[in-house]
Image (cartoon, rainbow, N blue to C red):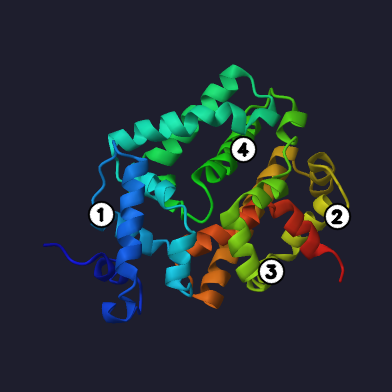
């Protein structure tokens, strides 16, 4: 006979006490597993694997019973099975979710060719492990629906695909307000509300850690609205060099903010990753706001 689900669950939560104090969790976990299996009868996923994944997505300071009652358990089950390479789960995800991609990104008015490319890119990023890194779908926490999570991922993938194609109309690339995207993602809303003050402090630290030249270029670009051509003439370089400077500075800000957040909050990589997603979704707005005189 296998271990009780409660014991399995708590063994994957740091500093959790023994299972005797959580006797009411067993029927809750059993119901979650049963309901998830009913939702996806063709998907085979060991209960122990699912319960371990369920525990890994539980915030450290969460009230466990309340958290378990609020998650989208069936969606999390499918995501976990997909992350573990279950072929039936991949087919179910394709059928129930990826097939709805045209509706999810309808406002972008993508051509069929571009939509097909975005779909394929998403399928690979979300379902395939690369270089020892788990598939992106493993990061779905169950806070909010899998469909809403996919919508955010799809719009971002579409924006990235557009930016990678110089021949496309720039207006198409800029047609989506990424701040609005972040607002539709329950996971991003959750971490923003809980860690907003620490997030802002970490980002300001990252801004202050930049060199004087980096800060000056950001101010000229984001506050004074100088173009990369203008900046190139000022620094006697071509515009592609300025573009590289801006890109590398953005990446440095993201990396430094992540480090500062880990130092301040001691969160898991998944939790810090969610916070960095908030920042990335509205990075340019955050830079402009942080650089404005107080």
For the N terminus, give its image quadrant: bottom left
Who's the residue at 34% across and 40% down the image?
40
Mark 2 or mark 4, which has the lower sequence index? 4
Element marked by disc 1:
helix
Tell me, for residue 223, which label it has, or none: 2
- At x 65%, y 33%, the residue is 163
Q: Which residue is mark 1?
A: 47
Q: Earlier in the sequence, mark 1 or mark 2?
A: 1
Residue 277: image location, x then y, percent:
58, 54
> SS for tag 3?
helix
Residue 63 in the image: x percent, y percent? 47, 73
Mark earlier in primary sequence (2, 3): 3
Cα distance between the residues tagged 2 and 4: 27 Å
Cα gap from disc 2 to disc 3, whole angstroms: 19 Å
The mark lying in front, picked from 4 and 1, is: 1
| Residue drawn where x is 81% and y is 52% of the image | 222
Q: Which residue is mark 3?
A: 200
């Amino acid at each position: 006979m296998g271990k009780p689900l409660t014991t399995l669950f708590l063994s994957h939560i740091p500093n959790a006490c023994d299972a005797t104090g959580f006797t009411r969790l067993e029927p809750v976990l059993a119901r979650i597993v049963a309901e998830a299996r009913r939702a996806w009868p063709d998907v085979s996923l060991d209960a122990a694997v699912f319960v371990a994944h369920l525990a890994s997505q539980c915030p450290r300071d969460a009230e466990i019973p309340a958290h378990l009652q609020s998650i989208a358990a069936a969606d999390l089950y499918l995501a976990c099975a997909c992350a573990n390479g279950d072929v039936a789960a991949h087919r179910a995800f394709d059928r129930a979710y990826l097939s709805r991609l045209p509706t999810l990104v309808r406002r972008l008015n993508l051509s069929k060719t571009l939509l097909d490319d975005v779909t394929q890119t998403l399928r690979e990023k979300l379902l395939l492990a690369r270089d020892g890194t788990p598939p992106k779908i493993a990061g779905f926490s169950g806070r909010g629906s899998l469909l809403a999570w996919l919508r955010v991922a799809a719009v971002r993938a579409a924006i990235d695909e557009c930016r990678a194609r110089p021949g496309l109309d720039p207006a198409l690339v800029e047609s989506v307000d990424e701040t609005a995207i972040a607002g539709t993602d329950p996971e991003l809303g959750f971490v923003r509300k809980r860690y907003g003050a620490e997030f802002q402090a970490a980002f300001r630290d990252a801004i202050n850690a930049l060199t004087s030249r980096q800060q000056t270029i950001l101010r000229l670009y984001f506050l004074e609205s100088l173009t990369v051509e203008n900046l190139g003439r000022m620094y006697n370089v071509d515009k592609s060099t300025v573009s590289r400077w801006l890109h590398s500075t953005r990446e440095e800000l993201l990396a430094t903010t992540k480090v500062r957040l880990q130092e301040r909050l001691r969160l898991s990589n998944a939790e810090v990753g969610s916070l960095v997603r908030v920042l990335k979704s509205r990075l340019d707005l955050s830079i402009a706001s942080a650089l404005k005189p107080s």
